[in-house]
């Protein structure tokens, strides 16, 4: 094959692969089988390895990884990556709405609601239509340059061919591991005799920081984008920004909704409380944003978060499981904490095996016995806790719970407070 022929075939293969990627990720249509797709990719990789000088930085072969990063370069974010204040009730949300209304001095305003994806925040920079950098959130001010790893995520465009996108801009979103991918990975871990991974979010986060991008590629991460950052006055509302991202080929979750007022926001919250569980991505709430960018700017930020946006967190989920035993942890101060050893149960995307029982009084209050079916609850970062006991299904031979009376480490007689 001559260099000229290689160049032509690389161009043709790249075009076909990009076309199929676009059809698959933007339109959810597969025009060819996975096998045929892999054949195209393999052929491209082969030619590029024969003619390394012809490999482009936006070649779809980057999707399979191969680059090894020893130390991720630290990058300072052009605009800090802030977090959102949380709310847990309709009342809190109405208070937020009151503050927005007051801050905007009674102008009319609209909200834009999105699901809150439970993944890892990422920032992507595009220059002249090419993905030039992908950076993790880090501490919000600076993060890690993980470009080679991000390039393996097939729904992240490596290049854009839309004419109306700015010369240079940043998009932000959430990298996540789809639930089905996480479950398969854990099945494999268990089959290999390894410890299963705790939850999709931590797994996505660990995967993004792996040194070998070909392992990252095999982990099949995905990404939803939800913010456009540019100093050009291209759009005047967040809805228009989202529409632009969709037009340019970014993967935007179709679950958003523009809401005229806080009552519509509350209906959206209600609508998604159950429906969100059918999605392939873990979500833990919704994000409410003031739609007008001018009004966002007028409302501004506190030290930690914007005044124009807020997160609403859904109530903790609960599940029933068996209490297999109780172990005791001795803290630095000598305090003894009983820990429930549970039959592993999937709860809000995490396999829960242990829960806090706080102290002897809490065990008495719950009236729990070993072997009981118990209700476990988990919310956000909080350690799962036992909230109830199903007395009706208690085994007939169950014995009253015996709390230890000596410290399991030093045998000292325990004192109850
Ligand atoms: S917008 C100023 N939209 O939640 C912050 N964030 O607590 C603007 N997140 O760090 C963020 N889904 O990682 C936004 N639809 C969504 C989101 C979302 C998940 C995460 C993001 C952010 C954290 C904020």
Image: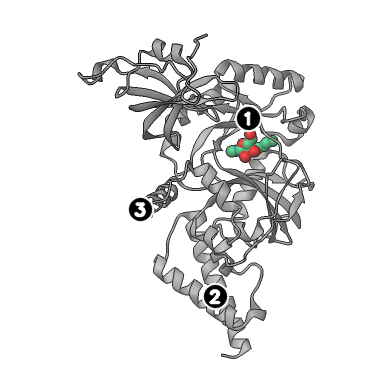
How far is disc 3 from disc 1 in space, using C-alphas?
47 Å
| Mark positioned earlier in the residue sequence (3 or 2) | 2
**How far across and how far down the image is residue 82, in percent?**
71, 36
Q: CA distance from mark 1 to mark 2?
A: 46 Å
Q: Secondary structure at mark 1?
A: strand
* Residue 32 in view here: no
- Say which mark, if any, is on residue 45: 2
Question: Is the residue marked 1 within 8 Å of ligand 1, measured from its CB?
Answer: no
Of the two numbered discs 1 and 2 on the same chain, state the one appearing first in sequence: 2
Answer with left or right where residue 382 lies relative to residue 375.
right
Mark 3 highlights which residue?
191
| Local crowd size for mark 2, using a 10 Å CA cut-off: few (<14), some (14–19), many (≥20) | many
Can residue 100 be seen from the camera position used here?
Answer: yes
Q: Position of residue 387 (x, y in %)?
A: 42, 19
Q: Quadrant of the N terminus?
A: bottom right
Task: Choose between 133 and 204: the one closer to the eye.
Answer: 204
Please tell me which residue is depicted at 73% across the width and 56% down the height of the picture: 73
Q: Hey, which quadrant is residue 54 in on the image?
A: bottom right
């Amino acid at each position: 094959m001559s260099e000229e022929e290689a160049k032509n075939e690389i161009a043709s293969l790249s075009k076909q692969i990009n076309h199929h990627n676009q059809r698959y990720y933007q339109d959810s249509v597969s025009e060819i089988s996975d096998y045929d797709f892999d054949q195209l990719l393999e052929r491209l990789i082969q030619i590029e390895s024969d003619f390394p000088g012809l490999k482009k930085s936006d070649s779809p072969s980057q999707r399979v990884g191969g680059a090894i990063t020893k130390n991720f370069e630290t990058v300072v974010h052009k605009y800090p990556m802030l977090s959102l204040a949380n709310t847990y009730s309709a009342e809190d949300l109405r208070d937020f709405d009151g503050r927005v209304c007051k801050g905007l001095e009674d102008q009319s305003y609209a909200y834009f609601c999105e699901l809150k994806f439970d993944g890892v925040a990422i920032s992507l920079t595009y220059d002249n239509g090419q993905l030039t950098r992908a950076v993790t959130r880090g501490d919000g001010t600076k993060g890690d340059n993980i470009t080679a790893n991000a390039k393996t995520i097939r729904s992240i465009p490596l290049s854009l061919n839309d004419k109306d996108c700015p010369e240079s801009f940043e998009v932000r979103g959430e990298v996540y591991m789809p639930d089905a991918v996480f479950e398969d990975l854990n099945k494999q871990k268990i089959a290999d005799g390894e410890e299963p991974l705790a939850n999709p979010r931590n797994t996505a986060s660990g995967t993004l920081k792996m040194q070998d991008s070909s392992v990252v590629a095999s982990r099949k991460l995905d990404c939803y984008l939800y913010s456009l950052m540019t100093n050009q006055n291209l759009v005047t509302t967040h809805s228009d920004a989202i529409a632009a991202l969709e037009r340019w080929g970014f993967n935007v979750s179709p679950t958003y909704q523009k809401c005229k007022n806080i009552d519509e926001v509350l209906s959206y919250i209600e609508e998604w409380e159950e429906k969100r569980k059918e999605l392939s991505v873990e979500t833990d709430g919704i994000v409410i944003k003031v739609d007008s960018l001018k009004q966002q700017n007028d409302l501004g930020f506190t030290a930690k978060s914007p005044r124009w946006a807020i997160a609403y967190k859904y109530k903790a989920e609960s599940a029933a499981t068996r209490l297999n035993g109780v172990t005791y942890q001795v803290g630095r101060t000598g305090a003894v904490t009983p820990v429930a050893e549970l039959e592993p149960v999937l709860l809000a995307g995490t396999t829960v095996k242990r829960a806090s029982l706080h102290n002897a009084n809490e065990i008495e209050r719950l009236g729990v016995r070993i072997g009981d079916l118990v209700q476990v609850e988990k919310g956000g970062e909080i350690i799962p806790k036992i909230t109830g006991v199903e007395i009706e299904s208690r085994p007939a031979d169950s014995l009253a719970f015996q709390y230890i009376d000596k410290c399991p480490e030093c045998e000292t007689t325990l004192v109850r407070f």
